[in-house]
Amino acid sequence: MKPETLEWVAKAEGNWSVAGREIQAAQPVWNIVCFLAQQCAEQYLKAFLEEQGIALRKTHDLVVLLNSSSSSIKELDQYSRDLAYLSTLGIAARYPGIDADQDTTEDALRIAAIVRDIVRAKLGVD
């Protein structure tokens, strides 16, 4: 695996790990967990693109990143709406006016887990 791909995977796993710790806290900060879930998914998609030699776009939009994969991650195509939702959460959760709750956060983690599992399998990461 390319060194850059490994860096993206490490960053994604760092976000996944911190999100997992935060969700277990006595009073989780739901907005932060949503942001970390979006970042995890984004970084895994960028890891895949890097490994495939596909130019990375400077975007946080998960659907744009998926579409950049040239249909190489067909398993995620059925999750386009979920990816769009997670993209929105990753941005909105950082600004006033929208607060995530436990249900929203669980959805964000579920979507991130799908991306994580599929991309890890594609990359051959244990």
Image (cartoon, rainbow, N blue to C red):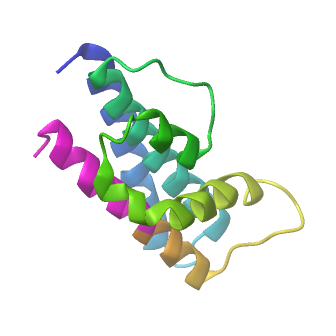
Q: Main secondary structure of the magenta part?
A: helix
Side (left or right) of 114 relative to 40: left
Residue 6, compared with residue 79, is above or below; it is above
Residue reaching furthest to the bottom: 103
* Residue that appears at 10% across and 46% down: 126
Image location of residue 51, percent across then percent down = 27, 23
List x then y, in percent, for residue 91. 72, 51
Q: Which residue appears at 54% of the width and 47% of the height? A: 62
Task: Name the residue nearer the viewer: 59 or 70.
Answer: 70
Q: Quadrant of the N terminus?
A: top left
Instruction: Please state the extent of the stretch shown in magenta in the rendering.
Output: 111-126
Farthest residue in the right direction? 97
Q: Is residue 39 magenta?
A: no
Q: Is 15 drawn above or below residue 107 in the view shown?
A: above
Is 76 on the left-hand or right-hand side of 3? Answer: right
Q: Left of 126 or right of it: where is 64?
A: right
Q: Could you tell me residue 41's position as x and y percent?
A: 44, 49
Front residue of 17/61: it is: 61
Decide: is 20 above or below 70.
Answer: below
Counting from the top left corner in percent of width and height, residue 81 is at 56, 66
Image point (55%, 48%), residue name: 63
Q: Tell me what residue is drawn at x 35 percent, y 62 percent.
A: 113
Left or right relative to 13: residue 93: right
In front here: 126 or 71? 71
Q: Is residue 29 visible?
A: no
* 13, 61: nearer the viewer: 61
Asked whether the viewer can see residue 112, the reply is: yes
